[in-house]
Amino acid sequence: MIYDRYAALYDSSGQVRFALLVAVYLRELLARHPAPGNRVLDLACGTGTLAMGLADEGWHVTGLDAAPAMIAQAEAKSVGATFPGSARFVCGDMRDAARALPPAAFDLVTCTYDSLNYMLSESDLLACFQSAADALSPGGLFIGDMNTQHFLEFEWGTCAVRELEGFVQIEQSHFDPQLATSTMVLTGFVGDDDEGYERFDEVHVERAYPMEFVDVLMARVGLTVEAHYDSFTLSPPGPYTQRIFWVARKRGAAAADAAPSENGARAAAPLRDSTTTL
């Protein structure tokens, strides 16, 4: 499983910065789109940085991640920490959070930092949105982000090297326009010049989806899109946007099947095969 070996190096490699930025950005989004309460589910929570940041602001947060090594890092970071709110962590699949968590128990569900791009088929992406909708109480809010195809194809780059104390990370990426996927091979070397280095390899694949298609999937599960934002701004996405944030709200139980959305006319469209060119 990806992140098994990388989990212990994740924060120190610089990945923690994204979660810190999201924590600040969420304050702006929630000022525009209030959640009805203070119970949060952070899907694909990773090492728990965002979850603990929210707990420090008074939210009661449950972080869920499929990688046991990432959950172990999150739990270790939270040991001894005190928050105005609370943070706990659960190992589970974000496509089926109901296996680990009660339904309609959260006022806000977040899913950030490319996590949705890891859903490589439309059915998996739909399952993730269904999982989020099931976890939300009526009127609850979903906030998630995805890399755009423009970013994966033109901005990600093909090779990057990071050198840190005791760790060297090499990323080699390739974009497939037919599948709208970017495959990144992450090679890490852990150790030092005296004792030598241990190598590990992980393969990370992300898929881009058109914004309008994501809207359709959200509508299918009863999530009404309130806004799309160009990453970390309050501006609408444009042709060169690298990341889009979605803000969507769960409709009331009585109106879940009938309430229209901006894409309601297309919401019943069948899913395409996961190999369809987008």
Image (cartoon, helix red, strand yellow):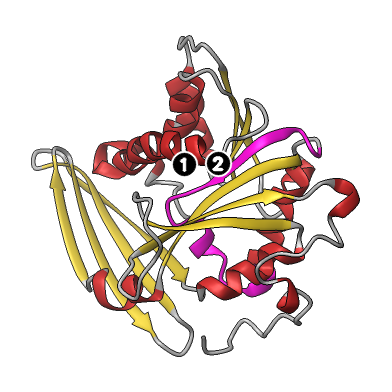
Q: Position of residue 148 (x, y in %)?
A: 40, 70
Q: Position of residue 275 (x, y in %)?
A: 58, 86
Tell me the magenta residue range: 103-124
Q: Position of residue 5 (x, y in %)?
A: 40, 46
What residue did someone put label 1 on? 29
| Type of amino acid at the residue the image marks with label 1 | Leu
| Type of amino acid at the residue the image marks with label 2 | His
Which residue, as the protein is rendered here, is positioned at the far left? 193
What residue did someone put label 2 on? 33
The answer to whether the residue labelled 1 contacts the one labelled 2, judged by CB atoms less than 8 Å apart, is yes
Which residue, as the protein is rendered here, is positioned at the far right? 254
Side of 179 relative to 6 (left or right): right
Decide: is 23 above or below 96: above
Helix, strand or loop at label 1? It is: helix
Side of 242 relative to 123 (left or right): left
Decide: is 157 above or below 49: below
Helix, strand or loop at label 2? It is: loop
